[in-house]
Image (spheres, rainbow, N blue to C red):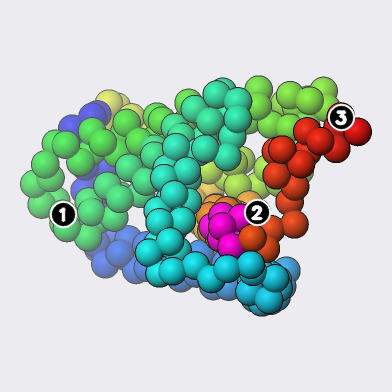
Amino acid sequence: MFTNNPFAALTDFSPPLVMQIYIVLMILAVVIGTLFDVYHKGSAKFFAQRRQKSDAAAQRRLSGGETFSLALETIAEAAVSGEFCKWPRRISHLLMMYGFFLYLITTVVMIFAYPAGAPTPTILPTLWTIGALMILVGGLWFFFFLRVNVAYDGASPFHLGRADLFIGFLLASIAFALLWHFVQTGYQSPAASRILFGIYIFFTTLLFVSVPWSKFAHMFFKPAVAFQRRVEEANGSSDVPSPAAESHIVRS
């Protein structure tokens, strides 16, 4: 199971071009969905106005080197999920983030570079499976124990809202991907394999086409907000009280 390209068997009933076109369509769905989300919520306008306000209130101008350094700090913070103070949420998000990158990259490589049953290096399906398991572990941990409405509001873990669309579709997609791969290689049942593959594609499609209504686009906005916050703190235009000022307010 860990060494077989799960997409190689699809050539028995579908040409490789079909899955390649599907991947391209899903990429377009994410791009279009994100742009629609930006337009619908006015995020681009908000960022432009905030940047203009920051430039007008800036006490000093940042050099190109300083701006680049702030960008690197933002990337480094995102790489370790530094915005989360509590380690359970951080570990959960890191498992999902790096698992998703691993799973997505190996999926694209196996579909485009090794179609039509071409010999696939065993490291690719192994990493694909590891990435999927990382998503499943981190996602289930977050879904059942770390969601705000569950951990702090006492809501049922099975209560679903709009904010749960992304994690719900992601977990369903990954779960059926692993089931499909297991049945395909372990039981070699063509009928069951095709049914599970269809369910897997169904939830994967929902994951990517639901971008305007889910928190998928949130992953693009957070780094932008974090970078702008760093810029405002560096150029003196931030309206957020410094730690020293906050402690003074509390004492007074």
Q: Position of residue 45 (x, y in %)?
A: 69, 76
Q: Quadrant of the C terminus?
A: top right
Q: Is disc 3 placed on a helix, strand or loop?
A: helix
Tell me if label 1 and label 2 are in contact, CB under 8 Å.
no
Q: Position of residue 211 (x, y in %)?
A: 60, 60
Left or right of 133? Residue 165 is: right
User: Is residue 216 shown to the viewer in this render?
Assistant: no
Circle 1 packing at 10 Å, graded few (<14), some (14-19), many (20+), is some
Question: Amino acid type of disc 3?
Answer: Arg
Left or right of 182? Residue 92 is: right
Q: Which residues are magenta?
A: 227-235
* Residue tagged 1: 114
108 versus 174 height, above or below: below
Question: Amino acid type of disc 2?
Answer: Ser
Residue 167 image-quadrant placement: top right
Eye-nearest disc, 2 or 3: 3
Q: Which mark is residue 159?
A: none
Q: Main secondary structure of the magenta part?
A: helix
Eye-nearest disc, 1 or 2: 2
235 versus 142 height, above or below: below
* Residue tagged 2: 214
Q: Which mark is residue 251?
A: 3
Q: Position of residue 223 (x, y in %)?
A: 53, 55
Quick one: 122 or 200, which is closer to the camera? 122
Tell me if label 1 and label 3 are in contact, CB under 8 Å.
no
Tell me if label 2 and label 3 are in contact, CB under 8 Å.
no
Q: Earlier in the sequence, mark 2 or mark 3?
A: 2
Eye-nearest disc, 1 or 3: 3
